[in-house]
């Protein structure tokens, strides 16, 4: 028998470099290590509770979508129609959370929902513009967890949409915990609704007006995890369902989480990378040579991003404004120190073990060699800016023109993230599922090895956290 395979497109259609920032072109390398250490996750999937809530959303949006005539998920149009029934439920959970008085946690779309609530929930599409509503598929909660839902068995049928056994159990758990008057039941969808009337643009209005009432008499049940409880264990019944799918006994995710938890001396992200590269337990799951270059990659990428932030800060705080001269920028003692750190970390990368088996060597080695060959601060600055222009993905921050650095995006005051390898979401999920105590790991992940990081860099608001 010939096995037939098909692709199910649950991700946004915009090219990855456009919707996700990649200032130095190192994302492919970061994703390589992330896939080795935490396959099936994404950097944005950091709350196991949302997997539970999205399971509920998938179950009931699936019922509505099927009633409305949906059935083919192999084409883009079918997937758009499927998501149109899911998106309102994601946003109604944000509304429900705010109604409870909780204002922290992973509440994507919160600002729009707050405007919608202030307008007595009368504005269409949750007070989002048409473009915001469309982009929510990229930046919303389902977008953050689509990789988990698509790739981890038991959650969906592998398409990211159709609930599988564990997802259905989680959905039932959510429904049972809701106050009786807001629980959904199959018979609610068998009442003669003219589904064609709501399809094609009015799906949100259906859920708000008829599908799931929003005038909550009381707000009980499960809610997204607030920030202050990020590393606390979930209730036992919920953990019993989530742990076997997220952290099965032989899964790489579990072995990585346990290796992190045992790294007692690691006090920083770089220290955790050292511990992972040298873990004898993890080496039984992941070829040791594959992880060997991880520490050098992490330190070099962090140093280079630290320099990028420093350069961006100097550009935007120069008295001449807009386009300071390269020669003037290179006189900054702070920026020169950061550039020297990049040069040193680049030299370490060129000596790193395991480079011969690292499949994304080109971009990072080009930067290391360019910084090695730069003999002055001006040369270093130009080498960094040139690499950003030639190898960066997404929006460019600046470019050199006629001896000046010209900014290309607005200064939002929001920091651009370092390159990361899913260690934070993995650790949070492991803590919530009771795999291990991860508080020390989460503290180390949050601690920046490079002090005094400037907070004035371009914001890629449509991207996942790096």
Image (cartoon, grey):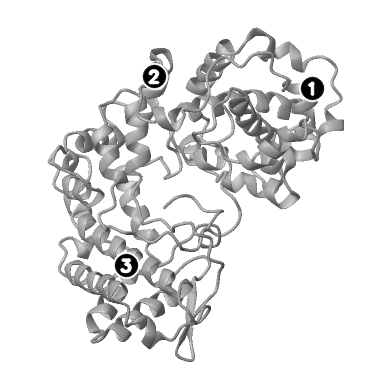
Give the secondary structure at mark 1: helix
Determine crowd level at label 2: few under 14, some 14-19, many 20+ residues with C-alpha closer than 10 A.
some
Give the secondary structure at mark 2: helix
Q: CA distance from mark 2 to mark 1?
A: 32 Å
Which residue appears farthest toward the top when viewing the image? 180
* Of labels 2 and 3, the one closer to you: 3
Instruction: Estimate the x, y position of residue 118 in percent, counting from the top left.
Output: 73, 34
Left of 370 or right of it: where is 225? Answer: right
**First reached walking from the N terminus: tag 2 or tag 1:** 1
Query: Which residue lies under the disc numbered 1?
Result: 210
Give the secondary structure at mark 3: helix
Instruction: Estimate the x, y position of residue 379 in percent, counting from the top left.
Output: 31, 85
Query: Which residue lies under the disc numbered 2?
Result: 239
Residue in view at x 83 percent, y 27 percent:
195
420 or 451: which is nearer to us? 451
Instruction: Estimate the x, y position of residue 147 in percent, counting from the top left.
Output: 48, 41
Determine crowd level at label 3: few under 14, some 14-19, many 20+ residues with C-alpha closer than 10 A.
many
Q: How many marks?
A: 3
Contact (Cβ within 8 Å) of mark 2 with mark 1: no
Q: CA distance from mark 1 to mark 3?
A: 52 Å
With respect to residue 252, does 387 lie above or below? below
Residue in view at x 72 percent, y 21 percent:
212
Residue 304's tag is 3
With respect to residue 367, does 108 lie above or below? above
With respect to residue 396, does 320 lie above or below? below
């Amino acid at each position: 028998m010939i096995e037939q395979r098909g692709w199910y497109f649950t991700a946004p259609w915009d090219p990855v470099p456009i919707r996700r920032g990649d200032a130095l072109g190192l994302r492919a390398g970061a994703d390589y290590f992330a896939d080795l250490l935490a396959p099936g996750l994404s950097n944005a999937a950091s709350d196991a509770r949302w997997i539970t809530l999205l399971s509920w959303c998938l179950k009931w949006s699936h019922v509505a979508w099927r009633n409305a005539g949906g059935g083919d998920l192999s084409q883009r149009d079918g997937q758009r129609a499927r998501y149109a029934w899911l998106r309102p439920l994601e946003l109604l959970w944000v509304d429900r959370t705010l109604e409870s008085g909780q204002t922290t946690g992973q509440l994507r779309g919160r600002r729009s929902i707050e405007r919608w609530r202030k307008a007595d929930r009368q504005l269409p599409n949750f007070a989002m513009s048409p473009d915001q509503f469309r982009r929510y598929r990229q930046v919303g909660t389902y977008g953050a967890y689509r990789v988990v839902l698509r790739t981890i068995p038991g959650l969906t049928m592998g398409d990211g949409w159709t609930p599988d056994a564990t997802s259905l159990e989680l959905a039932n758990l959510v429904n049972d915990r809701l106050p009786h008057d807001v629980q959904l039941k199959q018979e609610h969808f068998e009442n003669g609704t003219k589904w064609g009337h709501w399809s094609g643009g009015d799906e949100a209005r259906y859920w708000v007006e008829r599908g799931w009432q929003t005038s909550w008499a009381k707000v009980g049940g499960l809610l997204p995890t607030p920030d202050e409880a990020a590393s606390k264990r979930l209730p036992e019944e919920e953990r019993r369902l989530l742990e076997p799918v997220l952290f099965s006994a032989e899964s790489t995710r579990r072995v990585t989480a346990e290796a992190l938890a045992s790294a007692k001396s690691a006090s920083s992200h770089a220290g955790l990378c050292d511990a992972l590269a040298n873990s004898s337990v993890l080496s039984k799951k992941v070829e040791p040579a594959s992880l060997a270059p991880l520490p050098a990659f992490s330190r070099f990428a962090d140093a280079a991003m630290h320099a990028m932030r420093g350069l961006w800060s100097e550009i935007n705080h120069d008295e001449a404004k807009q386009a300071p001269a390269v020669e003037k920028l290179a006189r900054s003692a702070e920026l020169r120190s950061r550039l020297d750190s990049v040069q040193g970390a680049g030299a370490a990368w060129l000596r790193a073990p395991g480079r011969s088996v690292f499949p994304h060597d080109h971009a990072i080695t080009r930067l290391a060699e360019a910084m090695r060959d730069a003999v002055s601060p001006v040369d270093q600055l130009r080498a960094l800016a040139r690499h950003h222009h030639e190898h960066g993905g997404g929006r460019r921050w600046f470019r050199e023109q006629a001896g000046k650095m010209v900014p290309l995006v607005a200064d939002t005051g929001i920091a651009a993230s370092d390159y990361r390898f899913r260690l934070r979401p993995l650790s949070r999920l492991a803590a919530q599922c009771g795999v291990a105590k991860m508080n020390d790991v989460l503290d180390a992940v949050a601690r920046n090895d490079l002090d005094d990081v400037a907070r004035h860099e371009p914001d890629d608001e449509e991207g996942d956290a790096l």
